[in-house]
Image (cartoon, rainbow, N blue to C red):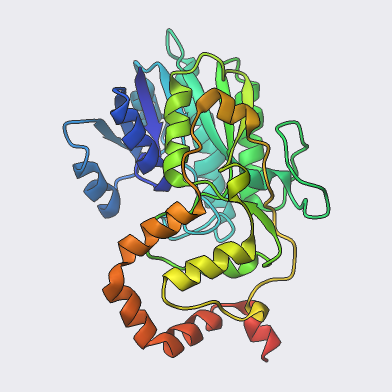
């Protein structure tokens, strides 16, 4: 298949690109030109085509969409851990230009093709809103609810795609943590008792790559999560992340008490169609431990009191509790 992959050098994009190339697809990568993305692109030199551009520029998007069988649209500004350094909630108008306006430009570019390619769009479990008072699991048929600018953008894009007349598939993803040495202050926004479904970034890449070749996904909304073994409470994730970083678990008062828009997912249909669930949270912990190496972890442990004070200073909940 000839595939256009937007957001090719982000967290999920990198995993998806790896799987697409392993499966022998002809991949055209579309992303913004940044030093980090240029460095990442060198790793696929000679294996994939790279087109630099901006989703807000129709001419860039039109050029990228030519002569493709499938478009995988991952490029999106997210609330936390955005590679741009700015999240949707920091600059909502700017983010909307990229997220909603960019998706609109992409749909127009696809529709303009003599034989329009099919479209796979990555959405999120956050579109279900605050569901901790409801019994799990969430399903594709559950109603969607706007809770912030990010979910508003995703829901609007889903609606545009459904109305586009194209062959489409929407994948609503669980919690996909990057394999990267970075602790974001957003970690404190999730209550420790919140249900959250983890899914390994490499399993997401496999799911998307398998979807590209599937005849059974079109017109469907599929939930992509790690399955029952990855249905966790947030304290299980936070504790393991902080321990593998050498920091150790932080006080409960550092974390929000307000319910957060995550939950467990019904992934039976997506697993039956895409056969992607191979890893669990323990595998991610192993990957992170290997990435950090003993020397970084030992360094953090040496200066643990300083690191812990720094992180706690980033928590508005801890500051409020100790004011």
Q: Position of residue 105 (x, y in %)?
A: 49, 29
Q: Is residue 136 above or below residue 103?
A: below
Q: How many marks?
A: 0
Q: Looking at the figure, which quarter contains the N terminus?
A: top left
Pick the quarter of the image with the C terminus.
bottom right
- Left or right for 281, reference 260: left
Task: Inspect this view and state whether residue 207 appears.
Answer: yes
Residue with the most extreme left position: 46
Q: Along the horizontal axis of the image, is 81 left or right of 174?
A: left
- Which of the 4 quarters of the picture holds residue 255? bottom right
Q: Is residue 225 above or below residue 39?
A: above
Q: Residue at x 37, y 23 (%)?
A: 3
Q: Is residue 76 above or below residue 178?
A: above
Note whether residue 56 is visible: no
The x, y position of residue 285, in whole percent, is: 44, 59
Front one among 208 and 73: 208
Q: Nearer the viewer, residue 123 or 166?
A: 123
The percent coordinates of residue 283 (x first, y second) are 43, 52
Q: Horizontally, is 255 left or right of 46 in the view?
A: right
- Residue at 32% x, 61% y is 290
Q: Position of residue 139 (x, y in %)?
A: 72, 35
């Amino acid at each position: 298949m000839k595939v256009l992959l937007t957001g090719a050098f982000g967290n999920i994009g990198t995993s998806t690109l790896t799987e697409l190339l392993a499966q022998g697809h002809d991949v055209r990568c579309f992303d913004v030109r940044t030093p980090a993305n240029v460095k990442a692109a060198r790793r696929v030199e000679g294996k994939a085509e790279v087109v630099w551009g901006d989703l807000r520029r129709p001419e860039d998007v039109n050029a990228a969409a030519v002569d493709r069988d499938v478009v995988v649209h991952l490029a999106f500004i997210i609330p936390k851990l955005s590679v741009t350094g700015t999240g949707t909630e920091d600059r909502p108008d700017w983010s909307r230009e990229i997220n909603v306006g960019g998706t609109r430009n992409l749909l127009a570019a696809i529709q303009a093709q003599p034989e329009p390619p099919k479209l796979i769009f990555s959405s999120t479990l956050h579109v279900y809103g605050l569901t901790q008072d409801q019994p799990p699991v969430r399903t594709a048929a559950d109603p969607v609810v706007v809770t912030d600018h990010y979910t508003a953008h995703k829901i609007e894009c889903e609606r545009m795609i459904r109305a586009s007349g194209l062959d489409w598939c929407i994948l609503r993803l669980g919690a996909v943590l990057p394999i990267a040495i970075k602790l974001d202050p957003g970690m404190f926004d999730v209550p420790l008792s919140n249900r959250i479904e983890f899914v390994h970034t490499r399993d997401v890449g496999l799911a998307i790559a398998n979807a590209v070749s599937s005849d059974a996904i079109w017109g469907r909304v599929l939930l992509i999560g790690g399955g029952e073994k990855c249905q966790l409470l947030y304290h299980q994730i936070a504790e393991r992340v902080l321990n593998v970083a050498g920091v150790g678990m932080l006080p409960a008062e550092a974390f929000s008490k307000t319910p957060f828009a995550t939950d467990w997912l019904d992934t039976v249909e997506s697993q039956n169609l895409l056969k992607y669930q191979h890893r669990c949270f323990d595998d991610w912990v192993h990957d992170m431990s290997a990435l950090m190496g003993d020397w970084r972890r030992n360094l953090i442990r040496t200066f643990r009191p300083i690191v812990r004070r720094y992180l706690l200073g980033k928590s508005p909940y801890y500051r409020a509790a100790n004011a």
